[in-house]
Amino acid sequence: MKALIRRRERIVRVRHVQHLQAAAQAAQAEGKVVSLESSAERLVELRSSLALPPGPVNGASLSNVGGIGDAARFRP
């Protein structure tokens, strides 16, 4: 009977450790999701800042935006 009790106690300890590990992995995954969402928002803001305003535009502005766009497109 004592062996059965010890075995069940061990199972409870192992399951507790497994639960703690799963909770840590879930928290780490949640942190990655938050980081990716933040990066996506920053990319949207950067892309919108590269758009030309409506109206007449001079050649220098087009050249600058084109150069920035090319650099961003070909960046590894």
Image: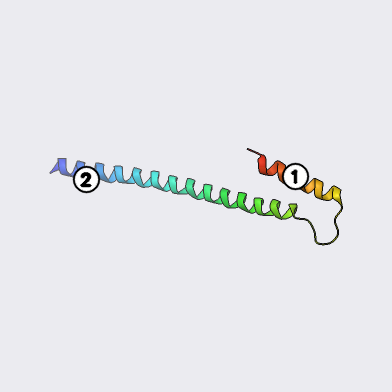
The colouring scheme, among rainbow, by chain, secondary structure or one colour, is: rainbow
- Coordinates of residue 74 in the picture (x, y in percent): 66, 40
Q: Amino acid at mark 1?
A: Ile
Indicate the quadrant containing the C terminus: top left, top right, bottom left or bottom right. top right
- The residue drawn where x is 48% and y is 47% is 29
Outermost residue on the left side: it is 1
- Coordinates of residue 75 in the picture (x, y in percent): 66, 39
Question: Which circle marks residue 68 in the picture?
Answer: 1
Q: Specify few, some or many for label 2: CA neighbours under 10 Å numbering under 14, 14-19, or 20 or more.
A: few
- Coordinates of residue 57 in the picture (x, y in percent): 85, 56
Q: Amino acid at mark 2?
A: Arg
- The residue drawn where x is 69% and y is 52% is 47
The secondary element bearing badge 2 is classed as: helix
Name the front one of labels 1 and 2.
Answer: 1
Disc 1/disc 2 C-alpha distance (Å): 64 Å
Q: 5 or 28, which lies in front?
A: 28
Label located before the other in sequence (1 or 2): 2
Indicate the quadrant containing the N terminus: top left, top right, bottom left or bottom right. top left
Q: Quadrant of residue 8?
A: top left
Outermost residue on the front side: it is 59
- Coordinates of residue 23 in the picture (x, y in percent): 42, 48
Q: Specify few, some or many for label 1: CA neighbours under 10 Å numbering under 14, 14-19, or 20 or more.
A: few
Q: Quadrant of residue 45?
A: bottom right
Q: 42 or 47, which lies in front?
A: 47
For this view, does 13 lie left or right of residue 24?
A: left
For this view, does 58 lie left or right of residue 22?
A: right
Question: Residue beneath label 2, please?
Answer: 8
